[in-house]
Amino acid sequence: MRSFFVLLLIICTASVNAQPFSFYKEKYRPQFHFTPAIHWMNDPNGLVYHRGEYHLFYQFNPFGNRWGHMSWGHAISKDLVRWQHLPLAIPEEKDTMIFSGTCISDINNTSGFADQPGTLPLVAIYTAHIENVSQSQHLAYSLDDGRTWTKYNKNPILDIGSKEFRDPQVFWYAPQKKWVMSVVLATNKKIRFYSSYNLKQWEQMSEFGPAGDISGIWECPDLFEVPVIGEPGKTKWVLMHSPAPYMQYFIGDFDGTTFRNENPADKIFRPDYGPDYYAAITYRNLPANSSPVSIGWINNWNYANDIPTTPWKSAMSLPRKLAIRKINNEWILLQQPADVVKSLRQKVLLMLKNETIDKTKKLSIKTQQCEIEIVLQPSVVTVSGVRLAAGNGHEIEIGYNAKTQILYIDRSKTSNRSFNENFEKLSHYETKLVLSNKLLRLNIFFDNSIVEVFANNGEAALTAQFFPDEKDNGIELFSINGVTKLASLNIWKMGSAW
Ligand code: FRU
């Protein structure tokens, strides 16, 4: 029976590839964010660039539109924004689900899996989850660029007898020619670091945590090196992870054994201050001199299973280009949409320059799928910004309070919120943002039921889902408590990821 469903999935997936446009037009369906054709998806897994292809594996239920039967779904892209579905990569097996993990291109064949010259092993390391019994780290490898996978016959490769030990992320630490794994002890709120020379035997090196946000369990760690803006050649290490249901990061140094946070210990730093950004990880094996790139899951465990989309659930964020900068003695992770996202821009829908906003300014266009670049010069006491999905008393508001220096997103007036009481409650999100040159620069990606906001060169990001009626397609600018100068506004229609 199970194999029948897997076959059905493969057929459906193949037909999505053959006729993408008839399938992907359902209500709320994002068009330029990755979504599975059918069924439930959560965390991105195994992000790796390998022989000219960006792989996106993801937590996937091949049997339904709620969490369960976790397996690795699979898609590839030549450019990180246009995706092609591939058949299920690593299916659940009997009682063992395939939880989150990593994928690396083993270019030196340290694992020894390549048995012929010219073969380049892709190695996946993931958590094997047996409900109420165990979580241990397992390995699978592919010798045909991720198309078929073999589970290692000596699994597990790392087992500490825990039920809460998961989400390994592995990278090559070049100075000591070894692999490093970060993995969480979820309920202890700790990240452990292990090292290996062959991806099969692992030795514990150190631990980090509890620290920062310890209100929820810790999941999905990722440790990676990031260039410092304005200081060529200088890098720092970012330790990012998901204290449920949000994310946080630490920035400091890693000496091959231990990570040391250099940011204030009493402050929480988040890669995204909106409700729907979780389990983000970065790409492995990117071409030399590329900036690190991350992708996150756009959903929130407080209501994820109930969102009103069918026949699929959940989307991935746009690929985000990462850098860091020191601002007021704190290291800040800067996130911008990867440059290639610009290639999805189609025609310009509207351009404005040097205008003023007094109360409400309704724009002449109507759309639920666009990119907006807006530069505002708010005066001292105004609250100003953009309203999307506006109509019939509905709207989602992205605003900046110049007095309190708070950037916020508020979805309390969007339609269709009653599917889950947590969703109704979790409606207002904000973060402090100090303006430089008195300008607020917002880059907003609106994709039917998703909005991703990047502020001031990536100093803050806010991602949210909402479920507007089709007629709620107006866009407005607003300024309360005075007039706000609109320095510039550009709106593009956005193309599709398929
Ligand atoms: C995070 C997470 C991971 C786990 C996976 C299971 O969203 O809970 O810790 O590996 O999802 O689907």
Image: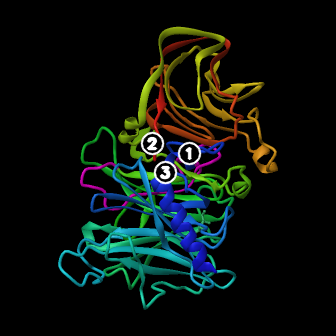
Q: Nearer the viewer, residue 469 or 359?
A: 469
Q: Looking at numbered disc 1 in the image, what kind of residue is underneath it?
A: Asp
Taking the image as drawn, is residue 362 in sight? yes
Q: Quadrant of the N terminus?
A: bottom right
Q: Is residue 281 magenta?
A: yes
Q: Position of residue 498 (x, y in %)?
A: 46, 47
Q: Position of residue 110 (x, y in %)?
A: 27, 79
Q: Looking at numbered disc 3 in the image, what kind of residue is underneath it?
A: Gln
Q: Quadrant of residue 359?
A: top right
Q: Residue at x 34, y 65 (%)?
A: 255
Q: Looking at numbered disc 2 in the image, what kind of residue is underneath it?
A: Gln
Q: Nearer the viewer, residue 284 or 210?
A: 284
Circle 2: element type: strand
Q: Quadrant of residue 212?
A: bottom right
- Type of secondary structure dominating the magenta stretch: loop
What residue is disc 2 on?
335
Circle 1: element type: loop
Placement of 18 over or under 273, stated as above or below: below
Q: Quadrant of ligand 1?
A: bottom right
Q: Residue at x 44, y 68 (%)?
A: 102
The mark closer to the camera, 3 or 2, is 3
User: Can you tell which mark lies on residue 19?
Assistant: 3
Write the start and end of the magenta stretch as one range. 264-291
Q: Position of residue 129 (x, y in %)?
A: 60, 79
Q: Residue at x 20, y 82 (%)?
A: 116
Residue contact at pointers 1 and 2, CB within 8 angstroms:
yes
User: Can you tell which mark lies on residue 272?
Assistant: 1
- Marks 1 and 2, how far apart at CA: 9 Å
